[in-house]
Amino acid sequence: MRLGIQLRVPLLFACALFAATGVVAQNVTVGDDESLSIKGFINVSLFAQDQKFSFGNGTNAEFPAPPEAETDPWILDGDVRNTRLTLAWGGPKLENDYKINGVVEIDFHGGFNGTSAFADEQATPRMRLAYVDLVKGKTTWRFGQAWSPVFGNIPASYSHVAFPLGYGGGGVIGWRFPGVFVYRDTTGADSKIKTKLTAGIMSGSWNGPGDVTSSGSAGEASFGPQVEVRYDWEAKNWSLYAAGHYDQKDLSGAGVETPDDSLDGTAIEVGAKWRKGAFSVQGNAYQGTAVAHIFGNITQFGDVSGWGGWMQLGYDFNKRWTGYVYYGVDDPDDDDVFESIGSAGRTHNEMYVLSLMYNVGRYGFNAEWLHDTLESGRAATETDGNQIAASVIYKF
């Protein structure tokens, strides 16, 4: 048995290496009734910016970080951190028609190896997903780290993949959490409109008061889970969903009790897609309170209420070239921001993106111009930022 395991481990690494270097992915048999699919993509971006961005520059740039640069601001760099590797196990079959699946997924947005001049060419892998599925008929139970149900429609872009356009500042919300999830198809095979129910009970999350990387946030201290429910409708050329979120935070932390130390987080969200011929449109909108941990309210951790939304229009010039126009906005309540965050808090953000995408087989190209305007402080000071990016992707 030990010899079999020792032989399989090098085989898995070899398969991952061949996939990453361009060989077409294959299913690998890892047992009598199990298989392993190796998939993902290689993503390369060249970008120029005239302003520093949050959550970073390059492929994770979302909104400008004040103050605005005025003298000689432009930078030019490359970024490969969107590159992703996914290992998906299928099987085995169990009694009573149950089946087990599993997924592990990584990218390279986990920071850099060191702080030297060579560090930005040595990106650190980051765990994205790790879960086990128990499947029977139309129902899937998922155990592990997966996407929260409010993570819905995603704007098309090859320059912003791991950090989508509008994420945390332009209406796109949701995050990955450990938890228990259930997915249930609720219509018959012959129905013209397919429906699906998704629910998640996930670990708590917040920014402090303790060590946020060691179960020390107010989310874990509340001793209560995050709860989300989503319902989807899908037909031939359109889809629609509605989702809700609830959680509770203990702001004084574990082992401490103070008056009014409980903070509820709530959100409702709707999203839609529609396609007719060469035209397409997609988007979503949300209203939420105290939901910075799912990237709401311009990602500001406090008792802040607000709304956000985005829309992306697409037009297929032919079967390979598509043009996109994107607009996203996030607008928290100013008084909430100043009371919870302080006088320098972020009060409004808007993102505009024009892009041209080319696809042929497993290959794709994306040229993109992003402009973002952030308002912050009591004087509503505007900080503008621009990013021009060209990206290539190979999907395996």
Image (cartoon, rainbow, N blue to C red):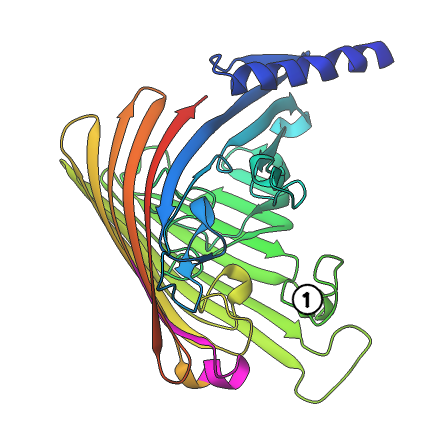
Hey, which quadrant is residue 194 in on the image?
Answer: top left
Q: Can you identify the residue that label 1 sits on?
A: 224
Question: Residue 348 colored magenta?
Answer: yes
Tell me the quarter of the image containing the N terminus: top right
* Helix, strand or loop at mark 1: loop
In the picture provided, is 389 more to the left or to the right than 226? left
Location of residue 235 with respect to 205 vertically, above or below: above
- Outermost residue, front side: 71
Query: Outermost residue toward the right?
Result: 2
Where is 267 relative to 201, above or below? Answer: below
Mark 1 residue crowding within 10 angstroms, few (<14) / some (14–19) / many (20+): some
Report whether 94 appears left or right of 364.
right
| Horizontal side, residue 387 vs residue 252: left or right | left
Amino acid tagged 1:
Gly
* In magenta stretch: residue 102: no
**Residue 18, how many percent across, how many down?**
56, 14
Q: Position of residue 169 (x, y in %)?
A: 40, 62
Q: Which stretch is magenta?
A: 336-351
In front of the other: 29 or 196: 29
- Identify the residue at image location x=37%, y=29%: 392
Residue 175 spot, x, y in % from top left? 53, 53
Q: Residue at x 66, y 57 (%)?
A: 203
